[in-house]
Image: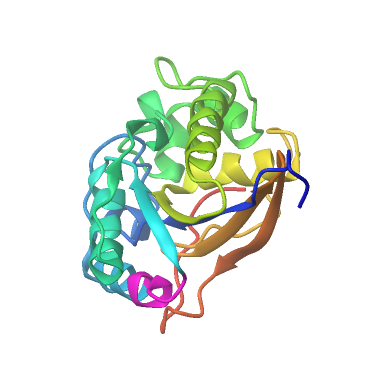
């Protein structure tokens, strides 16, 4: 490594465990839904899996489903998560609390914009993909810069993982999803001298019964 090259940082991005609303395909957004029993088991399994991974810091969205997942992981790692509101799920505005079927029926034009990944669509007082992308990637870059050469765990949401994957791979927000985002799935990314890469994605080997990926593409 040259004198001016920074050491690589690895980030383990974990989706929160399952909630009842995930099972119902109900849009949570920033409504503060807790884990169900399956989600709690998934969180504990993720913690056991990560215990030998050399994690030196733990961050999490402050929404309960992510925060409680991080608490279980933290117990296995012997550390407390840092509350990180910037990594909350996208604000889905009028869609929050509805199932995907209900949202499509009540707001057909808006749902078409959402399903078509219109990066400017904001759900009437919600949040556009462009705004969310700026919020999430700014904080992710800040966390990576704070921990050069370390392994850091970050517990977030499905929509957050969606934009992180596109950010790291350099893909447009409008591109249909070609990757999985399972509950309690483990995703490793790295940044070396300013260059981001996906090391592994959607790992569920720690989950005996698999996991939901209920999100639209």
Vertical side of 195 occupied by 17: above or below? below
Residue 179 position within the rendered picture, expressed as x and y whole percent measured from the top left: 66, 57
Question: Hey, which residue is sitting farthest top in the picture?
Answer: 125
Vertical side of 108 occupied by 21: above or below? below
Question: Hey, which residue is sitting farthest bottom in the picture?
Answer: 208
* Residue 50 in view in this figure: yes
Q: Quadrant of residue 90?
A: top left
Q: Quadrant of residue 47?
A: bottom left
Q: Residue 151 colored magenta?
A: no
Depth check, front residue: 149 or 21: 149
Depth check, front residue: 73 or 115: 73
Vertical side of 64 occupied by 20: above or below? below
Majority secondary structure of magenta residues? helix
Depth check, front residue: 88 or 216: 88
Q: Which residues are magenta?
A: 46-53
Residue 154 position within the rendered picture, expressed as x and y whole percent measured from the top left: 42, 51
Seen at 48% across and 65% down, the residue is: 185
Vertical side of 200 occupied by 24: above or below? above
- 95 lies left or right of 97: right
Seen at 43% across and 35% down, the residue is: 103
Depth check, front residue: 5 or 146: 5
* Residue 39 in view in this figure: no
Seen at 56% across and 32% down, the residue is: 137
Residue 177 position within the rendered picture, expressed as x and y whole percent measured from the top left: 67, 48
């Amino acid at each position: 490594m040259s004198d001016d090259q920074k050491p690589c940082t690895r980030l383990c991005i974990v989706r929160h465990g399952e909630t009842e609303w995930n099972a119902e395909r109900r849009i949570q957004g920033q409504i503060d839904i807790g884990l169900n029993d399956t989600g709690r088991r998934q969180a504990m399994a993720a913690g056991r899996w990560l215990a030998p991974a050399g994690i030196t810091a733990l961050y999490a969205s402050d929404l309960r489903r992510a925060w409680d997942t991080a608490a279980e992981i933290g117990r296995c790692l012997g550390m407390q998560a840092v509350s990180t509101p910037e990594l909350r799920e996208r604000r889905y505005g009028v869609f929050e609390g509805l199932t995907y079927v209900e949202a499509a029926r009540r707001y057909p034009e808006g749902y078409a914009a959402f399903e078509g990944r219109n990066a400017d669509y904001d759900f009437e007082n919600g949040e556009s993909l462009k705004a969310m992308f700026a919020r999430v990637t700014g904080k992710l870059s800040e966390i990576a810069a704070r921990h050069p050469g370390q392994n850091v765990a970050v517990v977030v949401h499905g929509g957050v993982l969606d934009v992180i994957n596109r950010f790291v791979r350099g893909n447009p927000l409008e591109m249909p999803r070609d990757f999985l985002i399972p509950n309690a799935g483990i995703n490793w990314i790295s940044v070396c001298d300013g260059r981001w890469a996906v090391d592994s994605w959607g790992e569920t080997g720690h989950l005996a019964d698999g996991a939901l990926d209920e999100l639209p593409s």
